[in-house]
Image (cartoon, coloured by chain):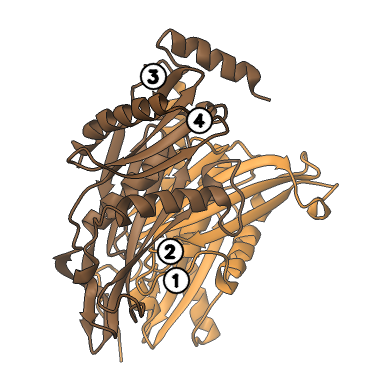
Amino acid sequence: MTYDKRFDGRKFDETRHMEAKAGVIKRAAGSGWFKIGNTEAYAAVYGPREMYPRFLQNPEKGVLRCHYNMMPFSSAGDRVRPGPSRRSKEISMVTERALRPVVDLSEYPNAVVDVFIELPQTDAGTRCAGICAASIALADAGISMSDLVCSISAGKVEDTMLLDLTYEEDSHEMGVDIPMAMLHNSKQISLLQMDGELPPEDLKRAIELVKKGCDQIYEVQKQALKNRFNETKD
Amino acid sequence: MYEELRNEIISLLSKQARLDGRKPEEYREVKIETGVSRNAEGSAKVKIGDTEVIAGVKMEIMKPYPDSPDDGSMMINVELYPMSSPEFESGPPDIYSIELARITDRGIRESKTLDTKQLCITPGEKVWMVVVDVCTLNDSGNLFDAIALAAEAAMEDAVFPTVENDKIDYKHKTDKKLPMRKKPITITVYKYGNNLLVDPTYEEEKVYDARLTVSVLENGNICSLQKGGDAAINTEDVFKMIDLAKAKSKEIRKLF
């Protein structure tokens, strides 16, 4: 069986339409908004500020702490009960790991940089959209960074390798979803997860697809930050 | 702690002025956008100046309460996200978010805005439950009014999902709107010394003496009240505050 035409008519290596903005949440030190298709993420950065509870403080350097959350009405099915779930806690953790390699908090011992990610509407790829928004937000907050992190999923439906799966593709019974995050300059991978069954050689193709997608995401992120800089200048 | 700020605000108010250049009775620009979250049965984003909240409606089917077997039900929940203010923390709802949710709930429930009889599917067995979640994106003051407005606008926007074999198919919506009969508009009036203002910034919210939240119906009747703040107010104050809320509600009502 082959999935030879995508449900939404996209090419196999084509991302959904993307939009991004920086500086969308005025109270935060920095913020970002990233939309890909019908998946939409806000990210706000607070800090560096003193870390509580205290035992979590690191006297060597500041800590990056991420909080991923879906708004209760954001999902295609039932209402999502407010409050952390096992799923949201794990995604918060992998988001932290995806961003940590580019963030330099050595100048902020005992401090925390909090990143809050909220999703008002979702159609798969939420952790990736969250990471893209968070990357913009950290840069907007002026946190010292060595690179931007771009994130998107690749996958497989039936026998076809695809970039940027929708919920319909992700939940296909023959669907494989591989969310990844990539450091733009070095092309190193800072998020890699998968569910489904896949011969390992297909992963190569998936990484190639993600690389291509991430180059486009980077341009969207960069433009958002440039626009923010221009509006601040005025 | 904020003595200086309070003195400055009062001194400005006595000259009919405010920190951000507004007049005491002047609201910031209000923007209402509906249909902002496609998976919700209804949704709305409300901006009041830089304050921004988003509300979404989800519908569920439940067994009715035994004392009202042919009435559907409604729940309003407020999520004060730490994203929206350095003062909000993660965790279970605190008393501030409970107060915000309950004021909004009363404004809609006690005015009988939602016709709960029309939410009945099979008496004694199945009724619709309307859950409205209001989430804050940015708190630059006046969440009371913003949250109530967003909940109201999201409910106005909402349609029933389709039901097949007793299961809700959230992917396919009907074009049947929620049975909304009225449109309460909620305005909170703040008192500093002998001065009143509406639509405070978060700085102004730190130092008020008293506040009164008033939900106003189109016919001028009021359908919920909540007095807050540490200072007591007299009868004359109450009516001054209600009059101001009524006047402001007319301006907001024009927007949707």
**Nearer to the camera, B204 or A71:** B204
Give the alpha-carbon distance from disc 4 to disc 3, as whole Å. 15 Å
Q: Residues within 10 Å of mark 1 (few under 14, many from 20)?
A: many
Q: Is residue A201 left or right of residue B110?
A: right
Please check whether the numbered discs 4 and 3 fall on a single chain: yes
Q: Which mark is residue B24?
A: 3
Secondary structure beneath dot 3 equals loop
Q: Colour of chain B?
A: brown
Q: Position of residue A171 (x, y in %)?
A: 38, 80
Give the alpha-carbon distance from disc 3 to disc 2, as whole Å. 36 Å
Image quadrant where one finds the C terminus of chain B: top left
Q: Output the letter for the chain in orange.
A: A
Residue at position x 62%, y 50% from top? B89
**Nearer to the camera, B30 or A51:** B30
Subunit bearing disc 2: A
The kind of residue tagged 2 is Pro
Subunit bearing disc 3: B
Q: Which residue is mark 2?
A: A72
Secondary structure beneath dot 1 equals strand
The kind of residue tagged 1 is Ala
Q: Is residue B128 left or right of residue A229?
A: left
Q: Which residue is mark 1?
A: A154
Residue B172 visible in image: no
